[in-house]
Amino acid sequence: MSGRDLHIRLKRHADGSASITCTRADGTVTWQRQKGQLGAVFPPHDLTHYAVERTLGCRSAFYGLVADGWEIGDFAAPWPRGEIPEEAREVELFVGCLDTERRQSTGWTAEEFNAHAALAVSASRFSGLRHRALTDEQLQAIRLLRDQLLQRWHALAAGESLEVAF
């Protein structure tokens, strides 16, 4: 991928829902509407994915796989493409830890973050996952990008969209 192979648009709707639309380089599109509470939960989660994947250079995680033709629905039960690749699982682990950290309004050190990630790996969802340890510098870069994107998201009025390229 060239870095501009996926156009991502998150839209805030007047009813409190949100939608994500991903347009691939070939013009094909995958999208999902997130209603109710999901409209509040998923945009920050999806933007955290973006920050992690861009900062760490991940190409086989959510946005890279979508750029390569996966549909958004492929990442949930009944798992039409089977188990997601190892890198995508690693990114999901990191995003989950970052989401927890953000909800708790704390800023973990790399040591604390990596300890939380190791604890999550012991859960069945991530069982057996081998993941890298993140550095304070990597976490700082991820948080900076994520926070910039979240600030843009939260500033949107109903009907407006945030757009980024991957």
Image (tube, grey):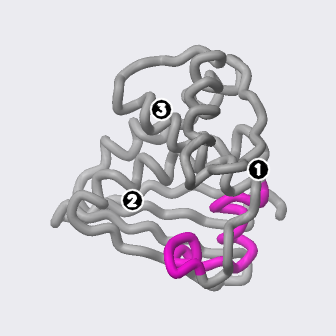
Tell me the crowding category of disc 3: few under 14, some 14 to 19, or many 20 or more residues within 10 angstroms, Cα based: some
Element on which disc 2 rests: strand
Q: Where is residue 75 drawn, in percent x and y?
A: 56, 70
Query: Residue reaching furthest right?
Result: 2
Q: Amino acid at mark 3?
A: Asp
Q: Which residue is mark 3?
A: 147
Element on which disc 1 rests: loop
Q: Quadrant of the N terminus?
A: bottom right
Q: Which residue is mark 2?
A: 161
Q: Amino acid at mark 2?
A: Ser
Circles 3 and 2: CB atoms closer than 8 Å: no
Give the residue drawn at x 30%, y 60%: 38
Element on which disc 3 rests: helix
Give the residue drawn at x 72%, y 75%: 25
Give the residue drawn at x 65%, y 18%: 110
Does residue 112 sit above or below 82 in this rendering? above
Is 141 on the left or on the right of 11, as rendered? right
Q: Which mark is residue 58?
A: 1
Label 2, label 1: how many angstroms apart (C-alpha)? Answer: 25 Å
Give the residue drawn at x 65%, y 71%: 66
Label 3, label 1: how many angstroms apart (C-alpha)? Answer: 19 Å
Q: Which residues are magenta?
A: 59-79
Does residue 58 sit above or below 80 in this rendering? above
Tell me the crowding category of disc 1: few under 14, some 14 to 19, or many 20 or more residues within 10 angstroms, Cα based: some
